[in-house]
Image (cartoon, coloured by chain):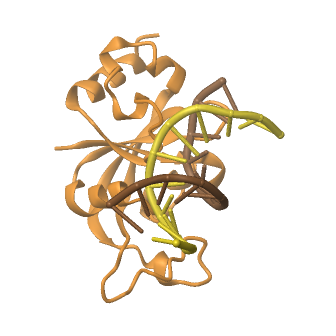
Chain colours: A orange, B brown, C yellow
Amino acid sequence: MNYWLMKSEPEVFGINDLYQKPGQTEHWDGVRNYQARNMLRDAMKLGDRVFFYHSNCDLPGIVGIMEVVKEGYPDDTAFDPDNIHFDPKSDPENPRWMMVDVKYVRTLSRTISLKELKLHPELADMALLRRGNRLSIMPVSVAEWDFILGLELAV
DNA sequence: GCCAACGTTGGC
DNA sequence: GCCAACGTTGGC
């Protein structure tokens, strides 16, 4: 099993929005970055676990856990001129952008903030903490995953 | 293929 | 609101 972290702005789509979706499942659409697209298309597999990260908000950090319930398939918001993520260069015959479906697993007992993550040398190599990383999807190692879940209860 | 200009992300 | 980082665009 692989582990991931995906960012979303809570003002736009937060973990409570996922919780309230039918089946607590949603398409993770709107990713318009090739590195992230490649992960959605090639690397994210059924059953993989994903940290839900709130970005661009009062307390940026990890707030919950999701599970991949459908592997990469074309992001059809790219074909819709009325959608904010419309991309005229994505051809339905050869889709440029991909998405996966994710399902809510649980909300952490507390937000593990970016600030807190930065305190731990064990996490220094996390993609999230590397300078200037603005990817909205990134891999998390097993060791990092377990360490972070340990932090949840370590207060 | 280079690179300047521009747009976006996202922490602070 | 500021600004550093970085991806994309487009002229040449």
Of all residues shown, which one is farthest toward the bottom?
A93
Does residue A92 sit above or below A110 in this rendering?
below
The structure residue drawn at horizontal position 22% and vertical position 51%, both measured from the top left corner, is A47
Q: Give percent across and percent down for residue A28.
A: 43, 61
The structure residue drawn at horizontal position 34% and vertical position 29%, both measured from the top left corner, is A126
Q: How many labels, in total?
A: 0
The structure residue drawn at horizontal position 34% and vertical position 24%, both measured from the top left corner, is A149
Relative placement, left or right, of A110 versus A140 is right
Residue A43 is at least partly visible in this image: yes
Relative placement, left or right, of A37 versus A89 is left
Q: Give percent across and percent down for residue A54.
A: 54, 40
The structure residue drawn at horizontal position 21% and vertical position 55%, both measured from the top left corner, is A43
Residue A46 is at least partly visible in this image: no
* Front position in the image: A51 or C8: C8
Q: Give percent across and percent down for residue A8.
A: 53, 49
* Front position in the image: B6 or A60: B6
* Front position in the image: A153 or A41: A41
* Front position in the image: A128 or A108: A128
